[in-house]
Image (cartoon, grey):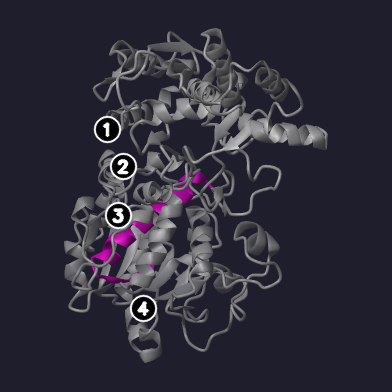
Amino acid sequence: HRRASRSWLATMAAVRTCHLSDLLVGVPFTASDIRGLERAWQLWEHFPPLSSDAADAPGLLYLFNGRCAGNSSAAALACERVQQQVEGGTRVGGRRAFGRVVLAQAGLAGRSDAYDKLRSSADWTMGPNNMFHRLLQQARRLGYGHLLQLEPDVLPIRAGWLDRAACLAAHSDAWVIGSALHANCSRDGQTGACESELPERFAYHINGNAIYAVGDPAFTAYAKAARNGPLRKLPFDLALHVLRDGRTQPARRRLLHRFQHSSFVVNMGTQLPDVAALRESLPNAFLVHSSAYASLTDPELRALFLAGRAVPGRALFLAGPAASGRPSADAATGLDVSALRAAAGADRTAVVAFVAGVQYAPLCANFVAHAQRAAVRRLVLVALDAPSLAMARESGLPAVDATRLVSLPDGGSDAFGSAAFFAINGARYLALLQMLRAGFSLFVLDLDVVLLRDPLAWLAGRGPAVAELDLMIQSDARDGVSTRETDPGLVTSRLGLPPGTGWTYANGGVFFCRATPGTIGLFDRVWSRLSAARTPPNEQDVLNRELAAAAALRWALLPADAFPNGFVYFYRPLGAPEPPVLVHANWINGVRDKVYHLREAGLWAVG
């Protein structure tokens, strides 16, 4: 009995050996991924792949999507940079991490290389699909049993991540080992909405950054069926998941163990992860996938991963109030608020208007002229790009230089719905956050606003009820009486709110916010959603979704008769007994049409 027991223990020890040389790390990349790769390499040095030197180290394959010697200079430079890394050797973090390192070319072009997150064609994901299947082929051809696919936006949070991957592969007969989406929602590339309820068919699929049993002929046949069958135009990870649905129930049951969910690599989608919290809550997590890393500067990324601390002024990691109880300015952002401080006075309250895009120059001139007519004293322009900074300074008004906070599309856009339009409107929130954190309460206005009275004087006459609110914001509803929108396309499809109830849809171009933890938290969350998106979303929808979820925030709508939006003022007037405080020329697309309507209404003050 003792001899049999020793034999059994010896057999189990042999089975549990983690064969590092059986594993290939596959890194697909394009010319635009070099910055991401360089940042990943830096973190590999801090979190070495292996815990010690290994004689049987894994392989590493970089697969370029096109041809290195093609017509694009960017392709040549990208391949040259990766080749330098390949020639740099197999050691990472002072240890031998890889047995061999190879750069290969997929040679994709045209439709076969397409990746369009707006899904404007049926072939929108052919590029990543082809890259994945090329990696599977390369891994089999090189004789590996398992492939760990790591896109450039997969980063380590612990050392020894290759040790862990090799052991996971050795101890499982699963075909795919990886993570479903851990974030609370997934951002839609077309609408920018963050959807918490995914289609049931896809909701639990394993993300493509995973371990694959490339040496198993049964998996090879299954992957080929996903690639060549009716699911071939789905993203490859979804196709592998959905392919099971077409099988009989007994066949689906037998396939369950072939797809193993694991926290080894955590898929956060478009959400920026809290690395310190992940380390604490998921002790077996070694890698984290997130497209939001691209929105961070190098110092912010290092702070997030290496120091385990908040990222100053960025998304989910905004610092709270200073010890004194008053929000403090964040020196790391470089935002000089001296002009704002001088204008705001002792109570640190001012009117601010954001300036971005040279095409808004006529509206800026009209805005300034009306503000001067209305004797608005505590007014500051906040410039988000260099041409706008020059324009703001020429106006004679105090100007805050916020050009270093954000990078905007050249020239911007005045076309509602365009990515550049949403980028400009979204960028305001980072500058706003910094000013709130510096302790300033602000009446925020768009440039297509016509000031007829001083909004701060209006506030001062409202009494203590207004003083208790964190936020007062303009209604963007077409009905100025009910101030509610009931359109299912807005309320349900875009905002994700229950049908039939309607919503007090707010406008992000006119509002007063006090420097309180409530408003800082609100705009922190808004900026988090905006900065994590690869395609700029509709920032006003993001704001309204956060307002709907902000149960503790003390907020109210500004009265529509005193602060009418463009639809109410131009198309469905309320017939108020006295002139409004301001008129907002929204609901009108483009500077040219705005100017026309303002001229016709007698609200154009410049030549």
Magenta region includes residue 441: yes
Per the rendering, the mark at residue 420 is none
Residue type (three-letter) at the residue carrying disc 1: His
Q: Which residue is mark 3?
A: 313
How far apart marks 1 and 2 lie (CA) works out to 9 Å
Q: Which tag is nearer the camera, tag 1 or tag 3?
A: 1
The amino acid type of the residue labelled 4 equals Pro
Of 101 and 374, the residue lying toward us: 101
Q: Which residue, as the protein is rendered here, is positioned at the far bottom?
A: 463
Residue of label 4: 455
Of 10 and 514, which appears nearest the observer? 10
Is disc 3 in contact with disc 4, using a CB cutoff of under 8 Å?
no
Dot 4 crowding, Cα within 10 Å, few <14, some 14–19, many 20+: some
Instruction: Residue 463: tell me if it is visible.
Output: no
Q: Nearer the viewer, mark 3 or mark 2?
A: 2
Which one is closest to the eye, mark 4 or mark 1? 1
Seen from the viewer's position, the closer of residues 474 and 567 is 474
The answer to the question of whether label 3 and label 2 lie on touching residues, with beta carbons closer than 8 A, is: no
Secondary structure category for the residue under label 1: helix
Q: Quadrant of the C terminus?
A: bottom left
Question: How many numbered markers are drawn?
Answer: 4
User: Is 156 placed above or below 175 here?
Assistant: below
Which residue is denoted by mark 2 in the rendering? 305
Question: What's the magenta region?
Answer: 418-446
Between the C-alphas of marks 3 and 2, the distance is 16 Å
* Secondary element type, mark 3: loop
Q: Which residue is mark 1?
A: 46
Which residue is rendered at x = 19% and y = 57% of the image? 336
Judging from the image, what secondary structure is the residue with disc 2 in?
helix
Q: Are marks 1 and 2 in contact (CB under 8 Å)?
A: yes
Magenta segment main secondary structure: helix
